[in-house]
Amino acid sequence: RDGDLVPALVIGSGYGGAVTALRLTQAGVPTAVVEMGRNWTTPGPDGDVFCDMHNPDGRSFWFRTETDQPLGYFSGGSTNKEIPSAAGVLDSERFAATRVYQGRGVGGGSLVNGGMAVTPKRDYFEEILPSVDADQMYRTFFPRANAALGVNRIDRVWFESADCYRYTRVSRRTAHDAGFDTVFVPNVYDFDYMKREAANQVPRSALATEVIYGNNHGKRTLDKTYLAAAAATGKLSISPLHTVTDVAPTRGGRYAVTMVRIDVDGTTLATKTVTADRVFFAAGSVGTSKLLVAMKAKGRLSDLPDDVGAGWGNNGNVMVGRAGWDLTGALQSCMPSMGIDNWSDSNGPVFAEIAPFPAGTETWINLYLAITKNPHRGTFRFNTTTGQVDLDWQASWTQPSIDAAKRVFDAINAKAGTIYRSDLFGVYKIWGDDFTYHPLGGCVLNEATDNYGRLPGYPGLYVVDGSLVPGSTGVNPFVTITALAERNVEHVIATDIGG
Ligand code: FDA
């Protein structure tokens, strides 16, 4: 409530925020989480909390009148549909030369993502975050994160015959034929539940085109794992549909946090200011970077280091589809289970997730989300004319990612006698290179913050989310973000809070 005093305030309820909320509440610290999106617990008129990909409505996108699907085209036309503008679960935030997809709601990105839970390769982790003790990460914090997230592995015997993974088996065979390795990838989707979906024993979710607009069943999202455990301590409060707009120090050494409360239609209901002893920025790479850059420019937190806003990357994301010869299946699980691992290629490392194309009909399409090692980094800057924060990422900067992915998929196409689809990301456009699912950086660990996420000059301000990771982690990022938050928050509780 307006005027409240709280010991700890967490901005955002994704991976960084959920870890922070659990560990603080377990240490006995009453914690208030402020989340701009909805608390996704109330069913809509159709009885479901979330809509599926084929029938998007106001629950799908964050305040858009038309969907903005990552694969927005098919056979020469747009596949986007008109929708009522509302506080939907998926945001496609537009900057000059890229769109950034993010989850909106209690649970952040966990509500909309593919659930792929990948621990990064150790030598690459050591390369990107040299100030972090890798022994400790791989011994303690990665296992802790995987356990708390509820990561599980697919039954490989079932996988080999499941209709819903035919698309993955086809892509595996063409990759192997061209000399590439593949690896199974763990997931937070409950694979036992999926088996029962396939056997028609339970309501379908991953097998019913549910993923980017949320899953009604089967997925261990953060509201069911970390945040549920935090709530069980009795020390957690969550304020959904509250957007933090301002953070500034008070005379008493605390922080005044201003937020706007909206309803689902976007009408402003109230503006409140709360005072907090400590504030944890967990608004995601884009949200945290934008907020901190704006606060520095507006003089609220003017002593923040110049590195705040720098070092943003898209995890080398680029998507591509191939037109194959093999049936990939009308029924496809929306949870990926395998990747093509060509990371050891020194000419251009690639880890390519074998992605579903759940059209509900046979398409012969093989789809991939390639994660590459892209050297370019963007910077967030405050625009005094518009009062907004811009990101200077350039369209041409995705070229190294395309080049690396092309080496893999050209070889696969050559061996299989297949071609690229050029109708999925535009008209005659092969590469899905103008968006990312994996924003990282903007407030990099040990550069913009100290080695544990503390913001220099402002005791009690911390960064705990994906903005700490310097633009790339070589695999799908949420396990990295979760484990790093576990490490940093444990240290902060022990040294700053005395827990
Ligand atoms: P995250 O974005 O999770 O949370 C930030 C939260 O803060 C959000 O809930 C947001 O609404 C809130 N917020 C922002 N600004 C705010 C403000 N001013 N006030 C209040 N609240 C605010 N990763 C992976 O490892 N495996 C996968 O399979 C996938 N797949 C995937 C698919 C799709 C479609 C997307 C969009 C993303 C993925 N990802 C993924 C990426 C993964 O979801 C992402 O890396 C993490 O969610 C990032 O975690 P953070 O804690 O950094 O922020």
Image (cartoon, rainbow, N blue to C red):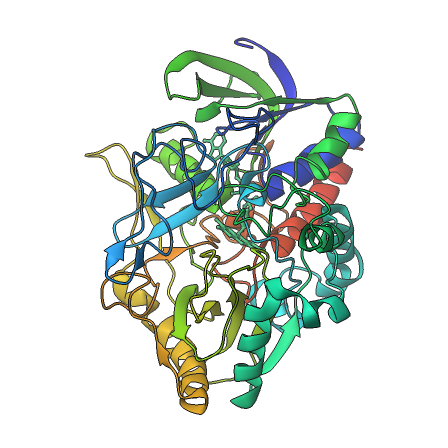
Q: Is residue 325 found left or right of 214 in the rendered image?
A: left
Residue 171: % across, % down: 53, 76
Asked whether the viewer can see residue 370, the reply is: yes
Instruction: State which quarter of the image contains the N terminus.
Output: top right
Work out whether residue 368 or residue 34 is closer to the camera in this orientation and state it.
368
107 versus 8 height, above or below? below
Residue 10: % across, % down: 59, 30
377 versus 156 height, above or below? above
Residue 42: % across, % down: 58, 24
Residue 164: % across, % down: 60, 62
Q: Is residue 113 found left or right of 396 in the rendered image?
A: right
210 versus 426 height, above or below? above
Task: Name the residue at 56% across, 53% down.
Answer: 114
Q: Is residue 91 found left or right of 214 in the rendered image?
A: left
Q: Is residue 78 found left or right of 444 in the rendered image?
A: left
Task: Name the residue at 46% across, 26% down.
Answer: 244
179 versus 420 height, above or below? below
Across the whole image, how many numbered discs are drawn on residues? 0
Asked whether the viewer can see residue 337, the reply is: no
Instruction: State which quarter of the image contains the C terminus.
Output: top right
Work out whether residue 144 or residue 405 is closer to the camera in this orientation and state it.
405
